[in-house]
Image (cartoon, rainbow, N blue to C red):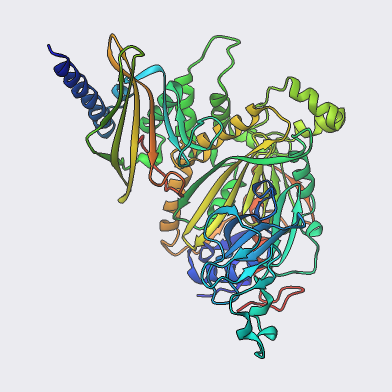
Amino acid sequence: MTVASDAFELERALHAFVVREARLLDDMQLDEWEALFADDGHYWLPASVGASDPLREAAHLYDDRLLRQVHIERLRSAHAHSQQSPGRSHHLLQSPEVLEANEADNCYRLRTSFVYTELRGGRTVSLPGVAHHRLRRSSAGFLIVLKRVDLLHAAEPLPAIEFYI
Amino acid sequence: MTTSPDLLVRADQIHRDLYLSPDVFALEQQRLFRRAWLFVGHDSQIPAAGDYISCVLAGQPVLMLRRDDAGVSVLHNRCAHKGAPVVSAASGKIARVLRCPYHGWTYGTDGALVGMPLKDGYEGTAFNHSEAARGLAPWGEVAVHRGFVFARAESDGRTFEQSMGELLEALDLIADRSPVGRLQIAGGVLRTEFRANWKVYLENINDSVHPVTTHASATLSARSVWGSPSEGTVPPLAMRQLLPFGSGYSFFEQMGGRILPGGHSVLGTRQSLHSSYTSLGDYGQALREAHGEARAEKVLDFSPQNVVFYPAMALKGAPQVMRVLRPLAHDRTVVEAWAFQPVGAPDSLLESALLYNRQVFSPLSLIAHDDLHLFERIQRSLGSGPNNWVSLHREARGAPPPGPRDVGGVDEALLRNQYVAWASLMAEHFPGSRGAQQ
């Protein structure tokens, strides 16, 4: 294959990863979704614009594997009364932009503009934002090192949001 | 329908219109939130002269401003000229003077009118005797304790110290978690907007019966995922913060509470969900050196579930976090969750506070979810059916003695106490004031 088609294949694979990641969330295939993260992978939803430190600045979420698993377990719990009439989510994605594809450092970064919509108890909440994926290639395919979600409303009062964005 | 406080609040139950009526809310804005000492902000948010934050008190935009003399002003954010807001940002720093962006009137950091363009045009007019000449109106009295800024629009004749009583000792104990006795707001704020009355949230802060049922989803999930690791494994801090929410009724019963005049309270005087967080090391030593052995021990022993500053603020001692309620309408409220860094203490304390806020108060958090869902549903279901009343009967036997007293952790006296204060702050005739504000 030529260099150009290699690059095209790589970009296609990265795009497919981001699209599948959102689909797994919307389809509530949460174990499969969680398995997309590296062992040291984090999900980060900052509560400010231009956040730089997930531990020393307020964040809506900064979840490692343990907390993601607790979160997922809760959504399935019979005791989660907010899920008695289960909510649903929908990600509308713009085509991702590959910001970095560095095979030497095994670092791949994508930026994806989106609108997230959640329906719960008959009420709809729509939140636009930008998702930043930092990926690492492994024998099992790409893994998420960091998914950072920058909401347009990051620093505004938010209503209760049930699912991962 | 009545908005008469006397008819809406009984000794052991309260009328549902307290939550459901826009008229009652309007009256709360006119009376309760003007007569109570409201938390405005922390002075670490405005360290230098000219620094300000803006916020809303009782439905009115105000700014809290560090004066040139290092004091703190709380002023209406309303130009004396045409009513434009003199600042629009949530926080910032003014140049030498506050300058209204509309016609350029300028004010000192105490709110006094300093100047305006075309000053000659006012000569020979009655301007000097007008309201406008007085500059930016102060919200009322301002009191600062350990950096916490409170303001009250209407006085009942009692001092800040008299109104706050034992709360100030609780504040001292929390502030003394810093070896230099000073807390600093750090890391930013988490804000959640929910569609329910502010009092539903405030009651919940003093309600230690709900976790067993409400938070089962979070605590059972945490337990099931964390599993039963081998003997001696210390759970990560995230788990140490989550798992205690699964404590049983007897734990909450024994945690103890203290009710104080004015609707204030301390929940968790003997123990709380936060009793066993901090690993101390050098920090414990620094506290002992700064405060002495006995005081340091007292400071570290004090880890209340919540210290409630009626009507709209609550503090936790360990972790050092604060919630502030910003009521927007009878059925809409914003709650803010702030974190403190005790000055001179390790950064891990701030990280622990921010972790706590993410896990418990974030609008996406495990714990807050179940609470918020219920609050919003209560706002919709409470009006249903013939029962006008919300029950506060648990342990309501006989008339309680006045003054501060210790109660059990699950005694609804903690809530009844809030409504004694509510009725008094809502009364048509208020001691020391001109009565109802129109």
Image location of residue B129, percent across then percent down:
70, 85
Q: Residue at x 53, y 62 (%)?
A: B389
Q: Quadrant of residue A163?
A: top left
Q: Nearer the viewer, residue B232 or B139?
A: B139
Up the image or down, B335 lies above or below A110; here it is below
Q: Position of residue B284 (x, y in %)?
A: 77, 24
- Residue at the far left in the pictured view: A1
Based on the displayed image, in which of its 4 quarters is residue A13 positioned? top left
- Looking at the picture, does residue B66 appear above or below residue B138? above
**Position in image of residue B385 (x %, y %):** 41, 62
- Give above or below for B291 relative to B403: above
Residue B221, percent from left and from top: 44, 27
Image-based side of B178 in relation to A15, left or right? right
Q: Is residue B52 left or right of residue A77?
A: right
Please identify the quadrant where the N terminus of chain A is shown. Answer: top left
Query: Is A93 or B357 nearer to us in this picture?
Result: A93
Q: How many marks?
A: 0
Which quadrant would residue B211 be assigned to in this image?
Answer: top right
Q: Residue placed at 65% from the left, 81% from the top?
A: B131
Residue A157 is left or right of residue B30, and the answer is: left
Q: Nearer the viewer, residue B314 or A91?
A: A91
Res. A18 in view: yes
Q: Would residue B212 be seen by someone viewing this image from the given angle?
A: no
Q: Residue placed at 49% from the left, 63% from the top?
A: B330
